[in-house]
Image (tube, helix red, strand yellow):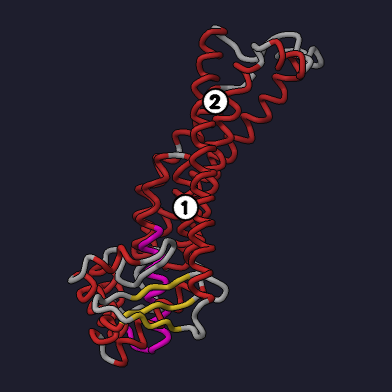
Amino acid sequence: MIHAVWLWLPLLVPFLAGPAGRRLASTLPPRQAVWLLTTTAAGLAAASTCALALLVVPGATHLRVIAALGHLLTPLGGGSPDAVVAVAVASGALLAWCTARLAQGVRRRWIQLRRAARLAAQARGELVVLTHDHPDAYALPGRPGRIVVTTGMLRALSAPEREALLAHERAHLAGRHHLFAALVDLAAVCHPALRTLREPLAYALERSADESAADAVADRRLAARAIGRAALASQASTAAANARPGLALAATAGPVPRRVAALLTERRAGGPRRRLLAPCLAAITLLACLALSAGASLQAADDLHDGVEVAQGELPDH
């Protein structure tokens, strides 16, 4: 039979990922943080969904139709049959709700992506300039993607700052950052605790684009000044964020003061060992959460397989 610990671990472990994710996004290099956060969110979501599905099976075998299909001599699950059935019903309801929300989320993002692609296809070049007074700039995904900027934003920045801002948005398109954000959003539908990874991922995505912009203009202070001035200009208008299409990523999003401070801190080739300790611990914590959830789900599935063979009378019950 399935040991309860293997089923509950994938459901509880995601609550540990949020604090580690926030620490990771602040200490690990942005590109590595993006990949690790996204992989962790997707893996934990898959493991928790698998655990819910496995919780349904023992209770379902109390139905004669399911028992007959599985050629089971006795139902699965130990303890009170009423408790096993109640857990199965609750897990099935949660699984159905998550599946419906996930399908809805995939459909909504697919529509947003197609709409963005149509808007991008209408433009002839990489840069699309909109005649609007409110300052705004964002990366619009598509094939190929476009950089959209308003005349208000162009007036708010100097020529070198505009170059840095465009390099930031270009990095979003080149890295296909909208896919990372969409994947973590969908993972959060599968388990509510994974919502805490959205903010760290958004910060890591913006920091990754910040570093690419600084490399493109070969001036970290210029990149920091461009992002800071763009954010200040966009704050003066509430219409900027509301006018952006879905999946659009903007340099003015997220905790801009933290990002500017990170850009103004020169990167060093080496450093004290204690500076490496925090990101290593955060990365190890997330990897441990992922390994623990995946291992528990696999073990639960193996236990279920053994339990089915016992119920079929093919193996002795140990």
- The label nearer to you, 1 versus 2, is 2
Q: Examine the structure image and report whether residue 227 is included in the region drawn in magenta.
A: no
Between 232 and 51, which is closer to the camera in this rendering? 232
Question: Residue 22 location, x and y as percent?
Answer: 35, 54
Residue under the image location 38 percent in, 83 percent down: 129
User: Dot 2: what SS?
Assistant: helix
Question: Residue 171 location, x and y as percent?
Answer: 46, 76
Name the mark on residue 92.
2
Name the mark on residue 1.
none
Disc 2 marks a residue whose amino acid type is: Gly
Between 289 and 213, which is closer to the camera in this rendering? 213
Q: Which residues are magenta?
A: 201-220
- Can residue 264 be spotted in the picture? no
- Can residue 289 be spotted in the picture? yes
Left or right: residue 221 compared with residue 65:
left
Task: Work out whether mark 1 precedes mark 2 in sequence or the reverse, and give the earlier one.
Answer: 2
Name the mark on residue 184.
1
Q: Residue furthest bottom?
A: 159
Between 105 and 314, which is closer to the camera in this rendering? 105
Toward which corner of the image does residue 137 lie, by quadrant?
bottom left
Q: Examine the structure image and report whether residue 217 is included in the region drawn in magenta.
A: yes
Q: Main secondary structure of the magenta part?
A: helix
Disc 2 residue crowd, few under 14, some 14–19, many 20+, Cα 10 Å:
many
User: Dot 1: what SS?
Assistant: helix
